[in-house]
Image: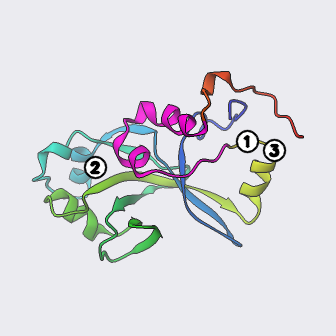
Amino acid sequence: MPAMTDPHFVKSVTYICEHNDTGAMGIVINRPIELNLEALFAQLNLDISEQKIASQAAQFGGPVQIERGFILHQPAGSWDSTIAIHGDTALTISKDILEAVANGTGPEKFLIALGFAGWSAGQLEEEMSKNAWLTVEATDDIIFNIPNNEKLSAAMNLLGVDYASLSEVAGHA
C-alpha cells in the first residue's frame, strides 16, 4: 500500500512462498539489483554457456539472509534443496540448480533472488489487518514474464485498481 514506509517493501510485489502457524516467507519479485547473472555466477565460479541469460538482473528478494540465493522456478524438477510452493512452482536454494541454469539445462522459467522476506508468527496477519498489504492471486505471467517495472501495475490490474489512485490513509468498515 502507498503508506508502506519500510524501504525494503515500498512498491514491492512479494510472492508468498510459505505461510503457516510459525510465520511466512516470501520473495520480492520486482526489485532488480545491480548484479547481473554473469557477475553473480562468476562469483560462484560458474561459467554461463547460456549467454541469453547473462545480462538478466538478480533480484533483491528481501532483507533476510541477503547473502543467500533463492531460485523461484518452474517446473519444480528434482534439485537438492527444493520446496514445492503451488502447482509446478518451486523454490530452490542449492547450487545444483545454478549450475544447470548456467549451462542451459535448468528450469524453463526462473527468477534468482538474493535474500528473502520473512515474518514471524502472526506478524504478516497483523500487517494485513492494518492495511499495509494488498493481496492478489499469484500468476505465472507476473512472476516470470512481465518486466520488473511493470509487475506492480500488472498485480494491481488483477484487482482492477490503479496504484496511483490508492489512499495512504486506511479505513475499516
**Residue annotated with mark 3:** 130
Label 2 vs 3, first from the N-terminus: 2
Q: Quote the CA–CA distance across marks 2 and 3.
A: 37 Å
Amino acid type at circle 2 is: Leu
Residue 92 shows in the view? no
Q: Is residue 139 above or below residue 6?
A: below
For the point 81% across and 49% down, the residue is 129
Q: Nearer the viewer, residue 137 or 73?
A: 137
Q: Nearer the viewer, residue 131 or 71?
A: 131
Q: Which residues are magenta?
A: 134-159
Q: Position of residue 163 (x, y in %)?
A: 61, 27
**2 with respect to 77 (left or right):** right
For the point 68% across and 30% down, the residue is 2
Crowd tier of the residue under label 2, counting other residues whose Cα lies within 10 Å: few below 14, some 14–19, many 20 or above: some
Residue 49 shows in the view? yes
Contact (Cβ within 8 Å) of mark 1 with mark 3? yes
Which quarter of the picture shows residue 47?
A: bottom left
Location of the C terminus (image quadrant):
top right
Which quarter of the picture shows residue 95?
A: bottom left
Q: Is residue 40 above or below residue 31?
A: below
Q: Position of residue 80 (x, y in %)?
A: 33, 77
Secondary-structure class at tag 2: helix
Q: Is residue 170 above or below residue 108?
A: above
Secondary-structure class at tag 1: loop
Q: Quote the CA–CA distance across marks 2 and 1.
A: 33 Å
Residue 40's disc is 2
**Residue annotated with mark 1:** 132
Label 2 vs 1, first from the N-terminus: 2
Mark 2 vs mark 1: give the one in front: 1
